[in-house]
Amino acid sequence: MQCTHWRRVPLDMAREARERSAAECVDRAVQCQLSTHSGDEHYGLLGDLVEYGIALWLRWRERIEVSLAVLPDCPAVAPRPDSEACCLFAGHTEQHTWEDVSPSRPQVR
Ligand SMILES: [Zn+2]
Ligand SMILES: [Zn+2]
């Protein structure tokens, strides 16, 4: 399960993200990309930067602070033939995105 927290992106941060990333537009609100987790620090993806392997994230805490974080991509790759790269950032907590497979979803063969 992905974390269900959303955060509105403050206008100045959206503008900065647009200037620094390759994205044409930046979402008005982002969802935390981590798997359901404890703690109140959430990370929403704003966009990939022009430099390869680095992305811009919105980091926030419940009702307290919002900040921009430039983080390198997580280097982990799934140990499977159809290996997918993890969509999170290096040093994240919780599971890699490819570990977070919902048990209700049937495996594709
Ligand atoms: Zn979260
Ligand atoms: Zn990862």
Image (tube, helix red, strand yellow):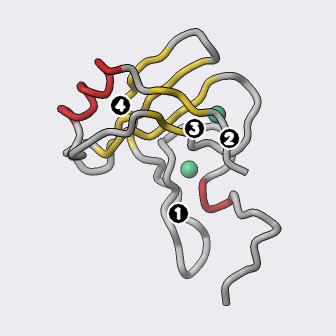
Circle 3 SS class = loop
| Residue lying at 48% horizontally and 26% vertically, measured from the top left | 8
| Residue lying at 67% horizontally and 47% vertically, measured from the top left | 2
Compare marks 3 and 1 and give the one earlier in the sequence.
Answer: 3
Q: Where is mark 3, residue-wise? A: 32
Q: Give the alpha-carbon distance from disc 3 to disc 1, as whole Å.
A: 21 Å
Q: Where is mark 4, residue-wise? A: 70
Compare marks 2 and 4 and give the one earlier in the sequence.
Answer: 2
| Residue lying at 49% horizontally and 37% vertically, measured from the top left | 30
Nearer the observer, disc 4 or disc 1? 4
- The reply to whether the C-beta atoms of the residues labelled 1 and 2 are less than 8 Å apart is no
Circle 1 SS class = loop
Tell how many labels: 4
> Mark 2: is the Cβ under 8 angstroms from ligand 1?
yes
Q: Give the alpha-carbon distance from disc 2 to disc 3, as whole Å.
A: 6 Å
Quarter location, residue 11: top left
Q: Which mark is residue 3?
A: 2
Q: Give the alpha-carbon distance from disc 1 to disc 2, as whole Å.
A: 21 Å
- The reply to whether the C-beta atoms of the residues labelled 2 and 3 are less than 8 Å apart is yes
Nearer the observer, disc 2 or disc 4? 2
Q: Amino acid at mark 2?
A: Cys
Q: Where is mark 1, residue-wise? A: 77
> Mark 3: is the Cβ under 8 angstroms from ligand 1?
yes
- The reply to whether the C-beta atoms of the residues labelled 2 and 4 are less than 8 Å apart is no
Circle 4 SS class = strand
Q: Amino acid at mark 4?
A: Val
Q: Which mark is residue 85?
A: none
Q: Amino acid at mark 3?
A: Cys
Compare marks 2 and 3 and give the one earlier in the sequence.
Answer: 2
Nearer the observer, disc 3 or disc 4? 3
